[in-house]
Image (cartoon, grey):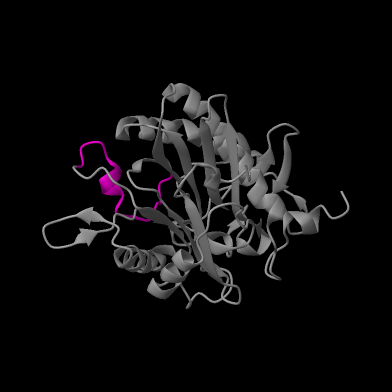
Amino acid sequence: MDNAITDVPGFRVGHAQDLKAATGCTVILCPPGTIGGVDIRGSAAGTRQIDSLHSFHFVDEVHAVLLSGGSAFGLDASGGVMKFLEEKSIGYQTSAAKVPIVPAAIIYDLSLGDSRVRPDKEMGYQACLNSQPGKIAEGSVGVGTGASVGKLLGIKMATKGGVGTASLSLSGGIIVAALVAVNAFGDVIDPQERKVLAGARDPDNPGRFIGSTAMIKTGFSLPKRETGFQNTTLGVVATNVKLSKRQATKMAQMAQSGFIRTISPIHSTVDGDLIFALSAGDLSADVNTLGLMAEEVVATAVLRAIRVADGLGLLPSFSDLYKGV
């Protein structure tokens, strides 16, 4: 196993990015028969096609999930994913054509790099061309290219975020895995040491973290609406256990605890946090077991995203701030 979401058989992941503009997108291509669910906790989510994941929706299939930078502009990259899938004759069969079902969600990364460049149809298509099983690139790639964390004092005092992935397996071959894009308003914290790994930094000592949660509790105000909706942590959890839409949604709900363990504050009014859940397989397991596994892999993936991130000359990263530690 590669400790990645691709450890779940049949899933492929592809990144595409513009390093100069500091933006990109990541696609998770699903095996046939994949069932999906979603749980949204943040108050500023940007999405497309997630209605198909609701239990009352007629369509059961999910063919791909797209995570994109570029704020709402980045939803255009879904068109490239749909084009790729249509060329492969993958989609929900209608009377006239096969229509690919591609739930998508975005992060706000316009504050770094060139805000005029956003993931588009061509970049979404390229991410599909780059998709592969096995080991996945992490850090400042794909949707994580322009990700940042700790924005209580604004983007200039933030720390670099990124993409991370992780997996767990049980006896009998059960696998639960996650891929996350960490672009949080809050700080990322090691849950064991209770140490801030990345977050808002002190203007008077940029190598020191201020502790966003503690400052807010003293009365420090969150950003205003026009400057605050610039944060989202996205996750995708996948398993080879056969689930219904309702069960997949429950796994997504429980997986959110992985964000709660590692990011503070989380699910705020200026975040758009959500987790997709994907089921592709024939194994059986209790959904509570899967939810606990999902919580753990999400937490691990968040820490991976931060530890592997590259500042790209735009913001300090974990490796910059903890150099030699």
**Residue 40 visible:** no
As displayed, is residue 85 above or below residue 269? below
Relative image position of residue 69 (x, y in whole percent): 48, 63
- The one nearer the camera, 193 or 89, is 89
Side of 305 relative to 47 (left or right): right
Side of 306 relative to 284 (left or right): right
Relative image position of residue 296 (x, y in whole percent): 59, 33
**Residue 140 visible:** yes
Q: Is residue 45 magenta?
A: yes
- The one nearer the camera, 56 or 44, is 56
Q: Which residues are magenta?
A: 42-57
Residue at x 64% of width, y 51% of height: 305
Relative image position of residue 132 (x, y in whole percent): 52, 58
Side of 107 relative to 305 (left or right): left
Side of 41 relative to 324 (left or right): left
As displayed, is residue 281 above or below residue 153? above
Q: How many marks?
A: 0
Relative image position of residue 21 (x, y in whole percent): 56, 75
Residue at x 36% of width, y 31% of height: 243
Q: Main secondary structure of the magenta part?
A: loop
The outermost residue toward the left is 95
Residue at x 48% of width, y 28% of height: 290
Residue at x 46% of width, y 40% of height: 238
